[in-house]
Amino acid sequence: MSCTTVLAGRNATNDHSTMIARTDDGSFDVKKMIVVEPSRQPQKYQSVIGHLTIDLSSLTPMRYTACPNVDPKKNGIWAATGINAANVGMTATETITSNPRVLSADPMVRYQKAQRRGEKDIPGGIGEEDIIVLVLPYIHSAREGVLRLASLLERYGTYESNGIAFNDENEVWWMETIGGHHWIARRVPDDVCVIQPNQFGLDHFDLEDAFGEQKEHLCSADLREFISAYSLDLNQGGAFNPRDVFGSRTDMDHIYNTPRAWFMGRYLAPSSHSWDGPDAEFTPESDNIPWALVPDRKVTVEDFHYLLSGHYQGTPFNPYTNQNTGKRGMYRSIGINRTGVTSICQIRPGLPEAIRGLEWICFGSTTFSAMLPVYPNVPRLPSYLSNVTLETSTENFYWASRLIGALADPHYPSCIQQIGRYQNAVATKGRELVLTYDRLFTENPEEKLLQEANGELCKMARELTSETLTKILAEASKQMKNGYNLADN
């Protein structure tokens, strides 16, 4: 599934929180946000795509949030993202690229249906459908998340190439799969932001640490042997760049992937690097755009929303520009029409454990949708987030957001100001409520306060979303092609 990921270490953010964020860009998948209590976690997990059964009965799950598909029968759960009761966040997965050298050496583990009577089906491996459910309820730190998923990959394999992010109060980890069974993971440095489109991302890795103290680098136990046995190392001069070894370098990357990294890097570090003009250090089609950058200023949730709403605004590639640049819409935008859900898992230091995690949720195209904060450590979420059906309805945040986007997109110049006001209003009022309930809960730590807070947050979002939908509908109606202005009113 094509997505975009942004990560930030604790010294790169304005409040020293760690943040991981991703757009879940499916095929217009209908999404909801729920809480999964331990009693609802399956003891025997059955995947849909891989036809794999995994016994979880010996493990003790925790409460966690998830953003699953409303229709699980279609392709499985696809829980996407969440924060658990131990304040560990996770987003899974970012579909990444590989190359034929890797995929032939360690083939993907795909489901094989029996061809003859008496034969048995051969299960496939795990994938994006499964990973949140199999990992997030059982981990107590970001590092532990890497190790649990690693054990599953090594045992069952995977049928796709994926990148996965984990965060806790102190650390952010990024993990990438290599072929069917191998993997690599790195702790995100505290002072950087990671910019990750649908491409193998890691461009630096310390093998000595990974096979020594393992402070900031982890990988498959046989990774060195795997690289050597199949002559995978393309690096020169003794450096080790995993992107060159395990990733791709294609013309399609220059249309689909590298431009997104360029746009995000251009926003985060406009002074530290040159991004425009004939002498630019990096262009939209550069293969060496860094995986991680120290931002020119501390980043915020609002910065993450802007990045994940990106459509090359301020450049000739903006699909909404009125200028005939000859380059309009030539690259894949970050804020795309088919996004189901976007989340920012934020783990905040210095607060009581029950409110340390804050999950920011946005449904539909991020360009036109608002980002709403939610307290995840509660037994259930308001119906505005969780009670989503396959039928279109203005009674929930998902469908109302999708309607706003679909109506505003063809009338971008006349609607975008209303969209900006809406997004800012939800963020401002959301922050006001979080500040209030952080203080109230710190003074009187009762779970009912968090449920009350989520109720107030959803009430606010519902009012502003409904108001905005009405305004956007009115503007779109005025611009219908069957209008006529010969004094017929």
Image (cartoon, helix red, strand yellow):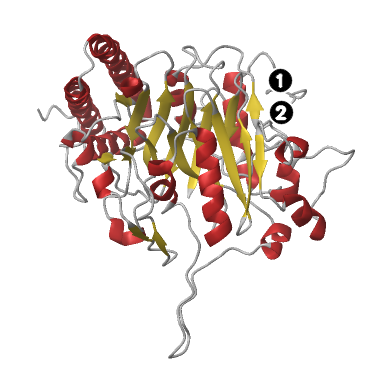
Q: Quadrant of residue 327?
A: top right
**Above or below, 482 relative to 433:** below
Place of residue 219 in the rendered image (x, y in percent of width and height, measured from the top left): 66, 45
Residue 63 seen by the camera: yes
| Label tally | 2
Q: As drawn, which residue projects farthest toward the front? A: 58
Residue 366 seen by the camera: no
Place of residue 387 in the rendered image (x, y in percent of width and height, measured from the top left): 18, 42
Callouts 1 and 2 close, C-beta under 8 Å: yes
Q: Which residue is mark 1?
A: 274
Identify the secondary structure beneath mark 1. Answer: loop
Q: Earlier in the sequence, mark 1 or mark 2?
A: 1
Q: Which mark is residue 282?
A: 2
Q: Nearer the viewer, residue 471 or 10?
A: 10
Q: Quadrant of residue 341?
A: top left
Amino acid type for the residue under numbered disc 1: Ser
Relative placement, left or right, of 447 versus 415 is left
Q: Nearer the viewer, residue 453 or 472?
A: 453
Relative placement, left or right, of 64 versus 259 is left
Identify the secondary structure beneath mark 2. Answer: loop
What's the residue at 41%, 46% (across, down)?
A: 132
Amino acid type for the residue under numbered disc 2: Phe
Instruction: Give the Cα distance between marks 1 and 2.
Output: 7 Å
Place of residue 383 in the rendered image (x, y in percent of width and height, measured from the top left): 17, 36
Relative placement, left or right, of 378 versus 4 is left
